[in-house]
Amino acid sequence: MEAPIAGHCGPRGSAMAAPGQRAAAGWGRRLCTAAAPRPWRLFGALCLLRLPRITQPLRREEEEMAALMGQIELEKSRYSDHEIRKLEEEEQLKRRKESMYDDDEGPGKTVIMAQDLEDKWEQKLLQFKAASRITDADKNNIRTSLNRKLDSNLMLLVKQKIGNQELWLLPQAEWQAGETLRSTAERAMAIFLGDHIQAKFLGNAPYGLYKYKFPRSIRTEDNMGAKVFFFKAFLQSNDLSQAELKEDYLWVTKDELGGYLKSEYLKKVNQFLLDL
Amino acid sequence: MSAALRQVLCLGKKTWLTQVVALSRAATPQESRLCAAGDVLVGCHRHYRSRPTHGIGKFKYLLPPEAPKRRKDRIQMKEINVGTEYEYGDINIQMTSYDMCLVEHFARYVHKLCNRLSIKVNESYAMPTKTNEVLFSEERGSKMQLDAVLTTHQRVVQISGLSSTFAPILLEVIQSNQPEGVHLLVKEHTEADFKIRLKARPELEELLAQMN
């Protein structure tokens, strides 16, 4: 349960807890003293989500249930105004045909019958063509476009150089003194996507934490490892043409993450991803 | 009934048994009549004032005193809770749509979700429906006017005591479960939101203006 604790007492608290842990056995959370060195480097990472644009298709049981409920409701319901009008006019027509008298005709009635209205509406409906759920990007599996997989969340993955390895990661930036971790994440977004992105952060608390120690060769007393704090943001605008993407980037769903991220990292990221 | 009782009390112990028998025979048809009527007067069970069981069953004196209820209580606005730094105050989740069943189902879902997550729901109400008439005028040949009547329904769920660490998670869950065609708006509760629900009384306002 590191993430909520980290969020609650601020990121500095957890960084201070680490030397406390090394010195004493238990989780001594001491007040931060400016002189103590910080062996953990802090990063703020951003999980930029594009929300789904259409709903997921219903499963078989859901469809059957929906059909059954619709049938029950239809049989239990009363007639609406339009249906009553339609029934009355049908009866009038029938009466006129049977009895063949034409009182009530009047001077050339131009009354629009309910049936005519329905025909007109049907025609209008046929003219309307809905866009297809599976777009071109889906068929060609172009992972860099935002038009893929319209019914699930898409996340941004960027290739970054860590140490001497090029890895696929959620975009992250190092924390600088004097800024909140959330602004670090915003800075990461600005670095990778440019300034004109409309993304909405929902809160100041981070969603997850990934801690790792540097390999022994680089590890020193002052530089034990790094902690990456994840923040979530939602893409407001669908138009990324203004974004200047410098390095390789991908938009992937939760299932496809496994093909790109390392297992430990993936485990932590999966903990805070909602896939409804 | 009381006459029979008085007889029992006046007479001595010797004749008590016979009188009791008479009393019971007299009592049962009356009792059945009373019970059959379903009346509140279960008179046969009334504990008389001189008996030690007088007043058994009373409980109103144990309850805390209630303020006397005025008949026409003006609807007072409840105090709007302005949250602290780590907690939000009263928040309105407003859901609007053209389809009433959809928006009601969604409001019910949000309410039950908040119950499950132990978030206090203050109230859950509906705003009055707005009806819009859409007129198309085709200008090809005969000018026809197709009408469409659109009704906009709005449901509001008011919650309070949302912590700042939990708010983004709740918002994300509600956003992911939003059905198509439903607009979602989450905002803090203000006095204006409360006043919208009340109807304006023009005659009263006129009279007040005349007075002043």
Image (spheres, coloured by chain):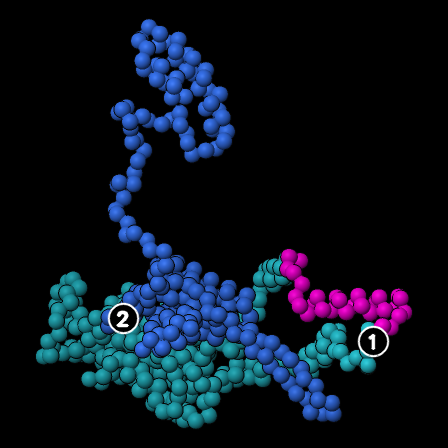
| Residue for point 36% across, 77% down | B210
What shade does chain A have? cyan
Tell how many labels: 2
Which quadrant of the structure image shows residue A105? bottom right
What shade does chain B have? blue
Residue A85 magenta-highlighted = yes
| Residue for point 77% across, 69% down | A89
The part of the chain drawn in magenta is: A75-103
> Relative to residue A188, is residue A85 drawn left or right?
right
Chain letter for mark 1: A
Which quadrant of the structure image shows residue A102? bottom right
Amino acid at pointer 2: Val
Q: Relative to the observer, which residue lies in front, A183 or B127? A: B127
Residue A83 picture location, percent across and down: 70, 67
> Relative to residue B16, is residue A113 drawn left or right?
right
What residue is disc 2 on? B82
What residue is disc 1 on? A105
Q: From mark 2 to mark 1, how far is it between C-alphas?
A: 68 Å
From this viewpoint, is residue A166 visible?
no
Residue at the extreme front: B211
Chain letter for mark 2: B
